[in-house]
Amino acid sequence: MNKKANTLLFVLGATLFNIFVALLSFVILLLLYAKFIAPSLQEGGYSWAFSLIFLIAIGVSILVYRVVLKYLLTKIDVEKYFDPIFVRNRKLKKD
């Protein structure tokens, strides 16, 4: 495979991993909420708790994604296997 295909597969895989971690953390947090916190809350607290669980799950997925990505980038030679996604076109102006 060439560098562009490697880059595309890496980005797709990383995106799917991030979505999977977000869903998994959301389900785990929701189950913990239902087991321990929900019985002690009143009626009005459910919607706030659901929103908070959703935001915490997104935060957890971002943190896990950053840690795993940092680890992978130390193990993989990026310049050897991947093509840059955004390329700056620097043209020097001569006056």
Image (cartoon, rainbow, N blue to C red):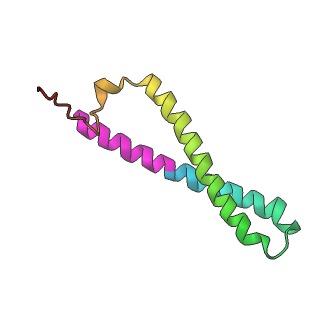
Direction right: furthest residue? 40
Q: Quadrant of residue 67?
A: top right
Residue at 81% x, 61% y is 35
Between 48 and 68, the one lying in front of the other is 48
In the picture, which quadrant includes the C terminus? top left
Between 88 and 7, the one lying in front of the other is 88
Direction bottom: furthest residue? 43
Direction left: furthest residue? 95
Between 65 and 48, the one lying in front of the other is 48
Q: Position of residue 3 (x, y in %)?
A: 25, 33
Residue at 50% x, 30% y is 70
Image-based side of 41 in relation to 12, left or right:
right
Image-based side of 29 in relation to 36, left or right:
left
Q: Is residue 58 visible?
A: yes
Q: Is residue 1 visible?
A: no
Residue at 30% x, 28% y is 81
Residue at 30% x, 32% y is 82
Q: Position of residue 63 (x, y in %)?
A: 59, 41
Magenta segment boundaries in residue numbering = 1-18
Between 82 and 35, the one lying in front of the other is 82
Secondary structure, magenta segment, majority class? helix
